[in-house]
Amino acid sequence: MPRNPIGIMGRSQFHRCDRALEAGNHGKIVAIDIETGIFEVADDILTASDRLFERLPDAQPWIVRIGSRAVHRFGTQNIRM
């Protein structure tokens, strides 16, 4: 759980709309304005945040991957030897 005010506000906005977001969007990126709750969903961070800024030029985005605690993963996955 984030300890900074922006993180708390972003996580709060995400939880307000997470059920609507999760349907058919698992693994996608959502950019949510921390003040209004307006959001955009896309396959990547840049597209989601650009769309949000088009709708709301003064947005303060919180970025999260739907269905995951992290936007990016580090390390390896599915390595076959």
Image (cartoon, rainbow, N blue to C red):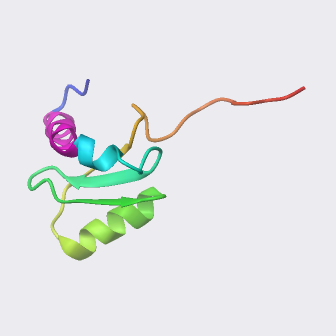
Q: Is residue 41 left or right of residue 55?
A: right
Q: Nearer the viewer, residue 26 or 32?
A: 26
Q: Quadrant of residue 55?
A: bottom left
For the magenta stretch, what is the residue range?
Answer: 5-17
Q: Nearer the viewer, residue 30 or 24?
A: 24
Instruction: Give the quarter of the figure containing the N terminus.
Output: top left
Residue visible at 13% across and 35% down? 5
Q: Residue 13: give x, y in percent of width and height.
A: 16, 43
Q: Residue 44: give x, y in percent of width and height.
A: 47, 58
Q: Residue 76: give x, y in percent of width and height.
A: 69, 30
Q: Nearer the viewer, residue 30 or 25?
A: 25
Tell which residue pokes out farthest to the right in this image: 81
Tell which residue pokes out farthest to the left in this image: 35
Residue 66 forms part of the magenta stretch: no
- How many numbered marks appear? 0
Q: Nearer the viewer, residue 80 or 47?
A: 80
Q: Taking the image as drawn, is residue 64 in sight?
A: yes
Q: Taking the image as drawn, is residue 63 in sight?
A: no
Residue visible at 25% across and 41% down? 19
Q: Residue 32: give x, y in percent of width and height.
A: 23, 53
Instruction: Give the quarter of the figure containing the C terminus.
Output: top right
Q: Quadrant of residue 65?
A: top left
Residue visible at 27% across and 66% down? 52
